[in-house]
Amino acid sequence: MHEIPPGEILKTLRELNAERVLIQTPEGLKREAQSLADFLEENGIEAIVNGDINYGACDPADREAKLLGCDALIHLGHSYMQLHLEVPTVFVPAFAEANVVEALRINLEEIRKLGRRIALVTTVQHIHQLERAKSFLQEKGFTVLIGEGDGRISFGGQVLGCNFTAAKVDAEGILFIGAGYFHPIGVALATKKPTLAVNPYSGDALWMDEEAERLIRKRWAQIAKAMDAQKFGVVISTKKGQLRLNEARRIMKLLRDHGREATLIAMNYINYPALEGFDFDAYVVVACPRVPIDDAENWRKPVLTPPEVELLLGLREDYRLDEIFGMEKTGNEPLGVALHGIRIHL
Ligand code: SF4
């Protein structure tokens, strides 16, 4: 169950004088988006639901909202990310109801193995419980650090699949709260510190070292398959928060300097079937770092991240996950903060 506060969204839209809005949603909140649209319509606001797949705040549908003549975009499920947006955008992170403190209580002995000085990180679904988790752990004798992270993220202690800056603090070990492996593996690889993931839904705890090694082995298999590739397609994304043209140019230059051919390709939704007609031996995805990793099995050609190209060319030795960094936080970010963690980008 996720909490979406329709009354607060309505109040925020009234403050913005919005008469027509576009609602953008990730897969898991489609029904909530539908109910929200009905609720807004009943309250005199024309609501259009965006049916496209959305994976993150990196892909706001502000251009579509503008095209549809909407006064505002409601972006469900993710938190604000510093981007230049074309319409006022209300970010509504969906908070999960799972009991984080109870999951920590069950796993206290395991958590003690991290040391006394620990960093606490989570995804946006559990961010509203982070302070409670911190107090609980402090009562149990831990020194708890919550890193601020860079401008790509909204809340202290929050990690994204492409950004682990909030985990990079002076701690002995990292405690990740949340479900799924990608984020805690990323935290373990980005910090090179012992990382324990506590799942607040199942109550399970899992150390990330073996998972990280397994991922690295798989990725080395991709790199090995690309070793003899001559022609590389370097794929960038036109999604606002994934567009990394300079990084792509850097990779193109590296490849060419090492005698390989490279062609730049721009796509919105990056997927292998759309690329199949091209004559490339391998691809580099310079966009969402999760695409080449989560989806590699569906690609008939090797697909790498930028740091993996550096490994392929012998320019680095240690494996690292690809990250997208934001600007440094200034405290003057162009946003208003409303109730309940809703953030408005004006
Ligand atoms: S770039 Fe990928 S990991 Fe980062 S916010 Fe977007 S979808 Fe998530």
Image (cartoon, rainbow, N blue to C red):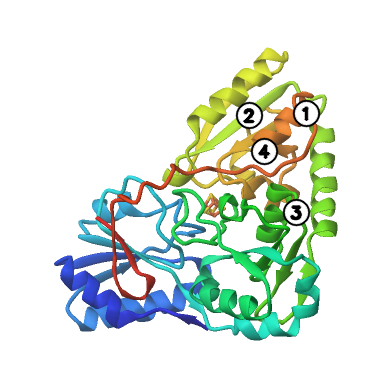
Q: Amino acid at mark 1?
A: Leu
Question: In screen coordinates, is 39 left or right of 211?
Answer: left
Amino acid type, residue under disc 4 in the picture: Thr
Which of label 1 and label 3 is nearer to you?
3
Badge 2 is on which residue? Answer: 233
Can residue 179 be seen in this snapshot?
A: yes
Q: Which residue is pictured at 67% across the width and 71% down the height?
A: 142
Distance from label 1 to label 3 (Cα)?
A: 25 Å
Dot 2 alpha-carbon crowd within 10 angstroms: few under 14, some 14 to 19, many 20 or more = many
Q: Is residue 329 left or right of residue 141?
A: left
Q: Earlier in the sequence, mark 2 or mark 4?
A: 2
Is disc 2 in contact with disc 4, using a CB cutoff of under 8 Å? Answer: no
Residues at marks 2 and 4, CA–CA distance in whole angstroms: 12 Å
Residue toward you, 9 or 51: 9
Q: CA distance from mark 2 to mark 3?
A: 34 Å
Q: Secondary structure at mark 1?
A: helix
Q: Residues within 10 Å of mark 1 (few under 14, many from 20)?
A: many
Ligand 1 within 8 Å of disc 2? The answer is no
Residue on which the image places disc 4 = 305
Quadrant housing the C terminus: bottom left
Label annotation for residue 312:
1
Residue 265, image x and y in percent?
54, 31
Disc 2 residue type? Gly
Q: Are marks 3 and 4 in contact (CB under 8 Å)?
A: no
166 to 141, vertically: above or below: above
Name the image quarter holding residue 10: bottom left
